[in-house]
Amino acid sequence: MTLGEEIKRVRELKNFSQEELAEQSEVSRQAVSKWETGNIQQRIIESKQKLK
């Protein structure tokens, strides 16, 4: 299970929407979506590769 899948699983267990989790975490709903889809992890990897 990926980190994003685990975030989504726990969010759903607590019956939170992405918006509710975002409010609790003080981030945007889009950030939560990126966490769950793994897009943010891919961007970090790409950024690291550009720095090499």
Image (spheres, rainbow, N blue to C red):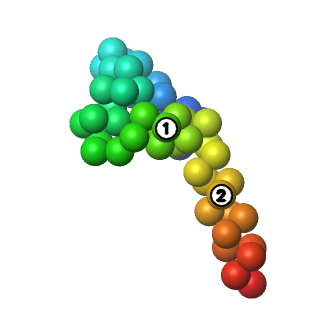
24 with respect to 21 (left or right): left
Quarter of the figure with residue 19 = top left
Q: Which residue is drawn at 28% across and 45% down?
A: 26
Estimate the x, y position of residue 24 in percent, counting from the top left.
25, 36
SS at circle 2: helix
Q: Which residue is drawn at 62% across and 43% down?
A: 38
Is the C terminus in the top left, top right, bottom left or bottom right quadrant?
bottom right
Identity, as a three-letter code, of the amino acid under mark 2: Arg
Which residue, as the protein is rendered here, is positioned at the far bottom?
52
Numbered circles on residues, count: 2
Identity, as a three-letter code, of the amino acid under mark 1: Gln
Which residue, as the protein is rendered here, is positioned at the far left?
24
25 with respect to 35 (left or right): left
Estimate the x, y position of residue 37 in percent, counting from the top left.
61, 36
Which label sits on residue 30?
Answer: 1
CB within 8 Å, label 1 to label 2:
no
Residue 11 in view here? no
Residue position for label 2: 43
Estimate the x, y position of residue 46 in percent, counting from the top left.
72, 64
Category of crowding for the residue at label 2, using alpha-carbon neighbours closer than 10 angstroms: few (below 14), some (14–19), many (at least 20): few
SS at circle 1: helix
48 with respect to 30 (left or right): right
Residue 23 in view here? yes
